[in-house]
Amino acid sequence: MILCAALLLALCAAGAFAQGKGLPVPKISIGVGTSTKPEDVSVTLQILFLMTVLSLAPAILILTTAFTRIIVVFSFLKQAMGTQQVPPPQVLVGLAMFMTFFVMAPTWSRVNDEALQPYLNGKMSMQQAYDKGVVPVREFMFRQTREEDLALFVKMSGVGKPSTRDDVPTYALVPAFAISELRVGFQIGFILFVPFLVIDLVVSSVLMSMGMMMLPPVLISLPFKILLFILVDGWHLVVGSVLNSFQ
């Protein structure tokens, strides 16, 4: 249910712009008084539930999308190059977010068409919208999740061996997807480290052979690593490799 609400919140803006209407401005009124109807208590609980969902929405959206893998790869690239402040963290996070939107666009479009718009038009209930909307997200996570990671969480959840993918609970699929994304991100990060590590080793060996052991090797190797990254069109290769890893 929390995942459904997070999906609805994330796609409301996209759905509104797709219809050419602009973003609706909500009207919120909060007051404290005496409740005389059971319905009032129910509405209060719904508001508390919504506030809880809003606090968990960033973590849910990060761990159910491509963001984790992308930002891990960028972090490894930054460490491998040795440029601690360039690019700034805000730039990398922003680029990772827009790449996430690009990767998740087909999935979110299906959620919008099959669940969000029918729910907003009153053609289905919230539970039906959740059942429809979670299917494309689960399909995306299943494509990127290793069977070993999924089996680990299914076993630990104690639900028994599922006969089909539909029997796998979402609360077991999400962490399995997250650690699978971390694994792939670390693999790509290791490959990125290798050429820069070779440059560091060569520079260190040359400086040591020249007796210049007091000179930090990073001062000499950093320009060469930047030059190598520019010559091979590094950003194009890295971004292209990350996007291709989701195919």
Image (spheres, grey):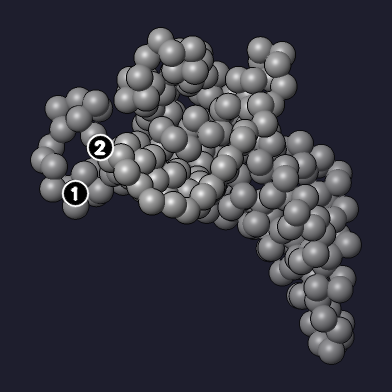
Residue at image location 32% in from the left, 43% down from the top: 36
Residue at image location 74% in from the left, 57% down from the top: 89
Q: Amino acid at mark 1?
A: Ser
Residue at image location 65% in from the left, 57% down from the top: 75
Residue at image location 80% in from the left, 73% down from the top: 218
When asked about the image quadrant of residue 176, the answer is: top left
Tell me residue 117's x, y (percent).
Answer: 51, 15
- Secondary structure of residue under mark 2: loop
Residue at which label 2 appears: 169
Circle count: 2
Question: Marks 2 and 1, Cα distance to the nearest angstrom?
Answer: 9 Å
Asked if the residue at tag 1 contacts the one at tag 2, i.e. Cβ–Cβ closer than 8 Å, the answer is yes
Q: Is residue 221 above or below residue 155?
A: below
Task: Give the side of residue 194 with respect to residue 107, left or right.
Answer: right
Residue at which label 1 appears: 157
Tell me residue 153's x, y (percent).
Answer: 25, 48
Query: Is residue 37 among what the camera can see?
Result: yes
